[in-house]
């Protein structure tokens, strides 16, 4: 699957708040988590009869 995050920004964020490095495997795992959350949000939008995914669909 395609990586859905800006890897350099994610790695820098982790480095900035923890001074830790990030392994390459994190990229795919985080992208998979994003996919799962997007799929849930899409289902919520469909259930409300909308064609637009909104912030509230992620709650």
Image (cartoon, rainbow, N blue to C red):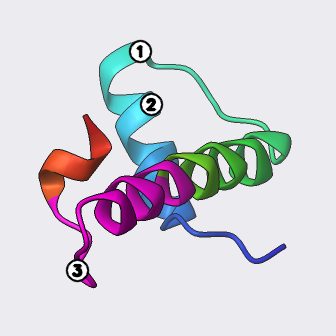
**Disc 1 on helix, strand or loop?**
helix
Report the residue at 41% width, 15% height from top.
Answer: 18
**Residue 48 in the figure: left or right of residue 34:** left
- State which tag comes first along the sequence, 2 or 3: 2
Residue located beneath label 3 in the image: 52
Q: Circle 3: is it few (<14), some (14-19), or many (20+) Cα within 10 Å?
A: few
Whether tag 2 and tag 1 are in contact, CB under 8 A, the answer is yes
Q: Quick check: 41 above or below 2?
A: above
- State which tag comes first along the sequence, 1 or 3: 1
Report the residue at 48% width, 67% height from top.
Answer: 6
Q: Quick check: 57 above or below 21?
A: below
Which residue is more in the foreground, 11 or 56? 56
Report the residue at 25% width, 50% height from top.
Answer: 57
Residue 59 percent across, percent down from the top left: 25, 34
Label number found at residue 14? 2
> Magenta segment, which residues?
38-54
């Amino acid at each position: 699957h395609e990586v859905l995050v800006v890897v350099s920004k994610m790695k820098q964020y982790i480095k900035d708040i923890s001074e830790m490095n990030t392994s390459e495997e994190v990229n795919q795992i985080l992208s998979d988590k994003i996919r799962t959350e997007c799929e849930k949000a899409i289902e919520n939008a469909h259930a409300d009869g909308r064609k637009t995914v909104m912030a509230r669909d992620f709650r």
